[in-house]
Amino acid sequence: MRQPILAGSAIVKSFSIDHRILGDIEVVSNYQTGSTDTDVSLVLTPIPDERDAVLAGTDLLGERISNDLTLKGTVRLPSKSEDIDSKMDLFLDIHRADLFFLKYIFSDAIGTVTGYLSGDGTIKGSFTNPLFDVKLGLIDGRFNVPITQSQYQIAGDVRIDREAIHVDAAKISDSQGGFADLSGRILFNDYRFFSLDIGGRLSELQIMNVGASTELPFYGFLWASGDITLNGPLYDATLFSNNASTRANSELFIPIEEDLSETDESFIVFEDSAGYIPDFNQLNTRPSILGRRPTAERRFLDGLNLDLSIYAPVGSTVHLVIDPLLGDVINAKSTGTVQLIRGDDKFQTFGQLSVDGGDYLFTAGELFFRRFIINEGGTITWDGDSVNAQLDIPASYRTRASRAGLPGSDAQQTGLIPLIVNLQISGTVNGPQVDLSLSIDQVNQNVLGDYKALEAQLNQPDRATEYATSVLLTNSFQLTTDNLTSDSGSQLAFNSVSQLVSAQLNRFLNEALPNVDFSFGLLGESAADLDVTYGVALRLLDERLIIRGEGVYQGTRAAENVRVNEGLQGEFVVEIRISPKVSVEVFFRREGDILETSELTNTTGVGVSYQTDFESWGRLFRRLTNETSETQ
């Protein structure tokens, strides 16, 4: 006699999880009397495009997610006599399984996720202890990381078994050609919690793309290479690397402001009105890996520990942001190694960067702008505090100053003095100290007078800062305590207006021509005694070709008994950088003596420069001969 069959089916339209509509589900089952097994079939298909993505039982729109998969096989119902759990023998065929579930694993680290998995496999075992044997391919995966504003593509092969989700070969890439090869496991831990055991190698992968931030202690544009590992539970994982390095054009911005405070809400537990405090073990333990994050369980980013040794190659730039609105920023080209450590709720940085170039745009309100060139030999040192580093940065600003206001100056010496305003930045990022001094600019200049006596006069201990500040702001010596009188007031006012006009013009030109460095200045104490300075630099072929010119135009003076080198003085240079250490330049100069009145002379020539560090002459000779033999 044939046994009766019990059949049933159910359809759920717009099946959703957390406002995400996964699709339509149809479940069909057949049970034959006397059998220990039940045939089941579950089909998940995308909702039709013409149907609105309305959440079941509401008027709210949900996120439409496309899934297309089939699960077929038999399920053995639990038996009291055998006192065993239910058994499964199912075949899974996945045409498309959306990657939205990654949000449940890395909820606070990942923003939007697109892409899907495709493959097949079996599911056996019991409901409480399933045995997976599934092989999948990850197709067209894309995701973003909001905190770093980075976007990535991901592809690879995935296996799922009883132990973990195995990433056999995955590749993460950015939009600029950087990538990371990853492999490892996302462990189930008996389906209690997720933990990570992942390793990989980065190759110029962009890890941060933040142009400005008021929430992060630092931000910037960073690309990294090297070996990494990520191990531990999601709420207490550790990211480790002992050989990471940034790309040469990486830029790090550190805002100079009050310390930022962080709040980890996962550790805040309140008692109720009766004074009862919930069991902390229950608050930080999930019932299963599919359960919601408990109140006291730390989010992935909050619990992420760091132990990273990062090398910054030559060409890396650290920006110390004093005033982002005015562009008051120290841009230091640096190289060195820093250690980033985060653990026990502390974020620390150790190491030192050697500063070998850059610039600093000095601003005084919105009136004066002076761009200093950072010299070699400086350092930025971290001894624990991540943003409050120790500074030792020398910089200089070249200018030509009028003798007006300088004690002992001869009235008939109306030529401009080429000067260097030396700036030494020390102290810490949050409390920088600035020292100013002056020196005669002898680079490419004729010197006939006693410039050392003048230099000593300019750097008297009690007057050096005063003189340097006056030159910096007015290109003269009138802004000193000896010259702030009614007689010089009109001249100082004219000089200040001239500097304001030139500063605003410089700001406009540099914004309008971002690929060209341009400077323009007006010098003088009256409209009848006015000189014009200029500077322009065009940088091409990734700064391998530099065309620049700078100088001053001195007009005719009103007094007939005053001799001055009238006309255009300065230089025009074409520089070709063959390598980071070797450059060739062709130049033309028209100049007079910097201290005396004499005729202008024209000079044309070719120069070759080679830069290297050596401890002894013998070592320099061996380095030169080795480099010569390698080039032949």
Image: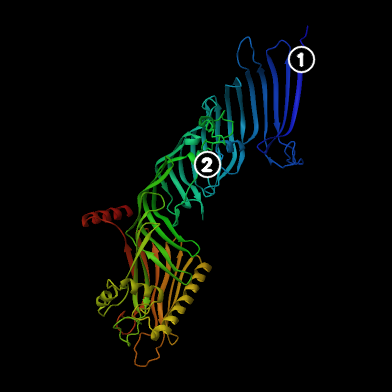
Mark carried by residue 570: none
Which residue is located at x 77 percent, y 41 percent?
50
Q: Which residue is mark 1?
A: 5
Q: Residue 473 lies in what quarter of the image?
A: bottom left
Query: In the shown orientation, is residue 99 left or right of residue 564?
Result: right
Which residue is located at x 50 percent, y 65 percent?
514
Residue at the limit of the structure toward the bottom, as seen here: 560
Q: Is residue 605 visible?
A: no
Q: Is residue 451 visible?
A: yes
Front residue of 391/68: it is 391
Mark carried by residue 265: 2
Residue at the limit of the structure toward the top, as seen here: 1
- Name the quadrant of the N terminus: top right
In terms of secondary structure, where does tag 1 sit? strand
**Number of residue marks:** 2
Q: Position of residue 630 (x, y in %)?
A: 31, 52
Front residue of 584/378: it is 378
User: Which circle's residue, 2 or 1, is located before the other in the chain?
Assistant: 1
In the displayed structure, would residue 314 be above or below residue 547?
Answer: above
Query: In the shown orientation, is residue 3 left or right of residue 210?
Result: right
Q: Position of residue 604 (x, y in %)?
A: 35, 75
* Label 1 crowd bin: few (<14), some (14–19), many (20+), radius 10 Å: few
In the displayed structure, would residue 441 be above or below residue 540?
Answer: below
Q: Position of residue 235 (x, y in %)?
A: 50, 36
Q: Position of residue 406 (x, y in %)?
A: 32, 80
Q: Amino acid at mark 1?
A: Ile
Q: Amino acid at mark 2?
A: Glu
